[in-house]
Amino acid sequence: MQPRYTVQLTSEAYADLERLFDFVLTRELTRPGGDLDLAAQALDAIHQGFALLQYHPFTCRKAGTNPFLRELVMPFGHTGYVALFEVVDANLVRVYAVRHPREDDYH
């Protein structure tokens, strides 16, 4: 099955991915017996979530009153991640942000 939508990340979303990766890696480096592969596994889980957006972006929950602005919940560990995205047109999904639900600015 050919993907219907192209998933495009904004520069802010790319920065979020780098920040989240660095956070997990730093946390695991400071833990006795920390799992250094965990940061890469977290990014893999996020990218698997993005793959869903290529086929079924409208299955994700709405984020406000705009029916095209939505949130993708990506499970990982005890919590996971949430991506804010918009279905821009019949072929494009744009990801604006990726957050961990425990972040201070998550809403």
Image: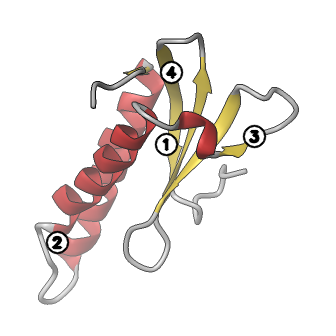
Labels 4 & 2 near each other (Cβ < 8 A): no
Q: CA distance from mark 3 to mark 2?
A: 35 Å
Q: Quadrant of the N terminus?
A: top left
Q: Which residue is mark 3?
A: 63
Q: CA distance from mark 2 to mark 1?
A: 23 Å
Question: What residue is shown at x 30% (from left), y 40% (from top)?
Answer: 18
Of the numbered discs 2 and 1, the one sitting upstream in the chain is: 2
Labels 4 & 1 near each other (Cβ < 8 A): no
The image's mark for residue 94 is: 4
Q: Is 28 rendered above or below residue 91? A: below
| Quarter residue 88 falls in | top right
Q: Is residue 1 left or right of residue 5?
A: left
Q: Which residue is mark 2?
A: 29
Q: Residue furthest bottom?
A: 32
Q: Which residue is mark 1?
A: 98
Tell me if mark 1 has few (under 14), some (14-19) or many (20+) residues whose alpha carbon lies within 10 angstroms of its own: many
